[in-house]
């Protein structure tokens, strides 16, 4: 998981934004007529798909798998319909003393700030293998949205009092909450980190293996770059540097694994790199990583 830069929606989306606003007004009016019935949410939000995918660098916002050879879902961070807590229980609301299910954050259904691109494994409830030998277990976000604070039930309620347990990578830096172990397993540094790993199943076995592979590939890349420099193989140097830049710009899958591998590979060589590459690779990121990842160098 990586911090996703929030981007202004380009002008060519203005018609889509206008229509989204119109639908939002209609949904709120429908809700007011018949609370707590929830309005029918159409699929208009899917019109933002290409824009969101671009801001996410074609990756799942949660696990950072590439969304190239799979459909991927336009995901509502705050669920548009039913809401469940982290134990799968339906969240209820009380209107005029009568308890009924939370209507969902229907007023954010077309709000681009509430939309993320997700792979289907993170977004849908599916069975996955883990390396604990316990067989298949169901994970995936679906309509799960646990919070620590005060729940918003209607468009008038403030969202900033909710304090979600799930990390939104557009709004905060996941590195505050997560760290990557040498085994490829993610570990929570905070309750938010632990809840996010658990709800989305971010330690499912195929992801752990992919992160481990990426870590080793990034470490090897540094070795290849150094060897190419030693042998003055300029074509190879250029190719390796291009791949390093791709990692530096977080275009490759699994950013944390990439950086861990890259920094591990760089530790013995950092004095040999050209200053521009060193600046990009090291200085921009070393403050975000622990000193251990650098083998104590510096
Ligand atoms: Zn994912």
Image (cartoon, helix red, strand yellow):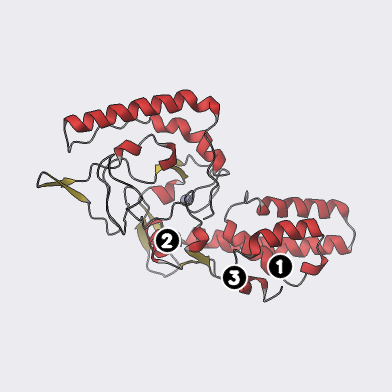
In primary-sequence order, the first of circles 1 and 3 is: 1
In primary-sequence order, the first of circles 2 and 1 is: 2
- Residue density around tag 2, few if under 14, some if 14–19, many if 20 or more, within 10 Å: many
Where residue 140 sits: x, y (%)? 37, 53
Which disc number belongs to residue 243? none
Residue beneath disc 1: 265
Label 3 sits on a secondary structure element that is loop
Instruction: State left or right for residue 199 relative to residue 260.
Output: left
What residue do we see at 86% from left, 61% from top?
Answer: 229
Query: Could you give the CA–CA distance between mark 2 and mark 1, rounded to whole angstroms?
Result: 27 Å
Identify which residue, 228 or 145, lies in the foreground: 145
Identify which residue, 16 or 140, lies in the foreground: 16
Give the residue furthest to the right. Answer: 232
Label 1 sits on a secondary structure element that is helix
- Residue 109 lies in what quarter of the image? top left
Where residue 268 sits: x, y (%)? 75, 72
Where residue 116 sits: x, y (%)? 45, 43
Identify which residue, 182 or 146, lies in the foreground: 146
Instruction: State left or right for residue 34 relative to residue 193.
Output: left
Residue beneath disc 2: 197
Evaluate whether residue 216 shows in this view.
Answer: no
Q: Is residue 138 above or below residue 43?
A: below
- Residue 201 lies in what quarter of the image? bottom left
- Residue 32 lies in what quarter of the image? top left
Nearest to the eye among marks 1 and 3: give it: 3
Evaluate whether residue 46 shows in this view.
Answer: yes
Where the C terminus falls, by quadrant? bottom right
Residue beneath disc 3: 290
């Amino acid at each position: 998981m990586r911090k996703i830069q929030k981007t202004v929606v380009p002008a060519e989306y203005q018609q889509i934004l206008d229509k989204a606003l119109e639908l939002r007004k209609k949904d709120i009016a429908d809700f007011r007529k018949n609370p707590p019935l929830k309005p029918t949410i159409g699929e208009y939000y899917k019109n933002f798909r290409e824009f969101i995918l671009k801001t996410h660098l074609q990756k799942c916002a949660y696990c950072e798998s590439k969304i190239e050879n799979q459909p991927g879902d336009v995901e509502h961070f705050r669920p548009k319909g039913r809401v469940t807590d982290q134990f799968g229980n339906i969240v209820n609301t009380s209107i005029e003393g009568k308890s009924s299910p939370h209507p969902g954050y229907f007023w954010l259904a077309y709000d681009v700030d509430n939309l993320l691109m997700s792979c289907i494994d993170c977004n849908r409830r599916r069975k996955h293998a883990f390396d604990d030998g316990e067989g298949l277990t169901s994970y995936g976000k679906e309509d799960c949205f646990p919070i620590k604070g005060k729940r918003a039930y209607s468009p008038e309620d403030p969202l900033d009092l909710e304090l979600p347990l799930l990390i939104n990578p557009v709004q905060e830096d996941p590195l505050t909450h997560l760290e990557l172990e040498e085994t490829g397993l993610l570990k929570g540094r905070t309750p938010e980190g632990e809840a996010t790993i658990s709800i989305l199943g971010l330690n499912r076995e195929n992801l752990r293996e992919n992160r481990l592979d990426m870590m080793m590939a990034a470490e090897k890349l540094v070795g290849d770059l150094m060897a190419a420099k030693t042998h003055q193989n300029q074509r190879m140097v250029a190719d390796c540097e291009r791949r390093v830049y791709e990692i530096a710009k977080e275009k490759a899958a699994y950013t944390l694994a990439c950086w861990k591998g890259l920094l591990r590979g760089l530790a013995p060589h950092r004095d040999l790199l050209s200053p521009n590459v060193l600046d990009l690779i090291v200085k921009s990121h070393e403050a975000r990583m622990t000193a251990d990842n650098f083998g104590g160098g510096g």
